[in-house]
Amino acid sequence: MRACAMMFCAATTIWAATSLAETKVPSMQAGTTILTLYKMCQEKPGTLQYALCLGYLRGLFDGMQQAKMVENTKNTFCPPAIPDLDQMKAVIDQWVRDNPKQTGVSLGWAAPQALSLAFPCDK
């Protein structure tokens, strides 16, 4: 069963990479800025850019949750158990509006910071 799941993931990744290569869509490469994500999140629902936005946010949320559990981080990120993608998108939107001089910073730095600030832990 696990092998089937891994094969499905690999096939999906290859298909997605091929599809993205054939279209001129911004990608989430190292060094991508928070402004790129913001612009992708502003696209119409159902577009590839919008889907990439939501996929990135979901993956980021899952990664931050996993890091919190595995590394037992010091209660810096306390979101609800089930992510609301519209809420996470709104967090990114607000961060970009609140930090116009920092829109050129790395997505890998700014997006986790935005989510951590939006979902602080009670002290």
Image (cartoon, rainbow, N blue to C red):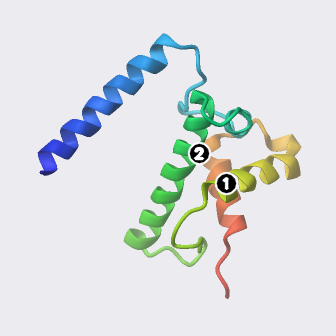
How busy is the neighbourhood of tag 2: few (under 14 within 10 Å), some, or many (20 plus)? some
On screen, residue 57 versus residue 8, left or right, reads right
**Which residue reaches farthest top?**
22
| Secondary structure type for disc 1 | helix
Q: Quadrant of residue 119?
A: bottom right
Spot occupied by residue 36 in the image (x, y as percentages of width and height): 69, 32
Check disc 2 and report the residue beneath it.
108
Query: Where is residue 15 drawn, in percent x and y?
Result: 35, 24
Rendered position, 18 above or below 73: above
Residue assigned mark 1: 86
Q: Residue at x 42, y 64 (%)?
A: 66
Q: Are marks 1 and 2 in contact (CB under 8 Å)?
A: no
Q: Nearer the viewer, mark 1 or mark 2?
A: 1
Q: Quadrant of the C terminus?
A: bottom right
Secondary structure category for the residue under label 2: helix
Q: What residue appears at the point 87 percent right and 41 percent down from the top-left corner?
A: 101
* Image-quadrant location for residue 30: top right
Q: Residue at x 56, y 37 (%)?
A: 51
Q: Residue at x 86, y 48 (%)?
A: 97
The mark that comes first in sequence, 1 or 2, is: 1
| Residue closest to the eye, 80 or 107 | 80
The disc placed on residue 56 is: none
Q: Residue furthest bottom?
A: 123
Tell me the distance, in whole angstroms, between the alpha carbons under discs 1 and 2: 20 Å
Total labels: the figure holds 2
